[in-house]
Image (cartoon, rainbow, N blue to C red):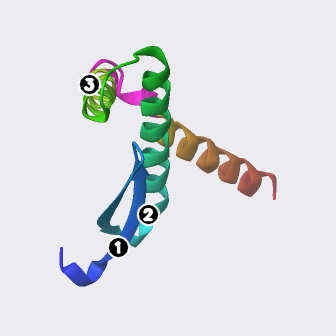
């Protein structure tokens, strides 16, 4: 993949901005994934006081990896995309 096919995207995670390059068609999914991860870090902060952000990020990553390994179909971004596609298919079949 060439550099020209990637667009720069800024995402926030654990109070910091990260600039990454992604395919244009993946931008929305990447932003949603970053938002979900950031919400998980915020949730972890409220349950485990006294840890630093690196600990929360590591815990978030471990939770995501274990969820993906045990149930690959539980990804909230994928489930939302499937729901959108199902709705579009239903609309097409109705017309």
Q: Which residues are magenta?
A: 67-75
Which one is in front in this view, the residue at disc 2 or the one at disc 3?
Answer: 3
x and y percent of residue 89 in the render?
Answer: 66, 51
Q: Is residue 4 magenta?
A: no
Within 10 Å of disc 3 (Cα), the crowding (few <14, some 14-19, many 20+) is few
Q: Residue at x 31, y 23 (%)?
A: 51
Mark 3 to mark 1 CA distance (whole Å) = 26 Å
Quickly name the residue at label 1.
Answer: 8
Marks 1 and 2: in contact by CB < 8 Å? Answer: no
How far apart are labels 2 and 1 at the CA level? 9 Å
Left or right placement of residue 72 versus residue 44 in this view: left
**Among the 4 quarters of the image, the one containing residue 68:** top left
Disc 1 secondary structure class: strand
Q: Position of residue 70 (x, y in %)?
A: 30, 18
The label on residue 27 is 2
Mark 1 Cα-neighbour bin, 10 Å: few <14, some 14–19, many ≥20: few
- Which residue is at 34% across, 69% downward? 23
């Amino acid at each position: 993949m060439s550099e020209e096919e990637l667009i720069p995207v800024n995402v926030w995670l654990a109070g910091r901005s990260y600039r990454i390059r992604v395919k244009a068609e993946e931008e929305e999914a990447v932003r949603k994934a970053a938002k979900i991860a950031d919400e998980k870090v915020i949730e972890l902060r409220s349950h485990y006081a006294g840890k630093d952000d690196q600990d929360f990020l590591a815990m978030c990553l471990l939770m995501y990896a274990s969820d993906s390994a045990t149930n690959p179909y539980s990804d909230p971004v994928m489930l939302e995309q499937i729901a959108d596609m199902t709705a579009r298919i239903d609309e097409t079949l109705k017309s």
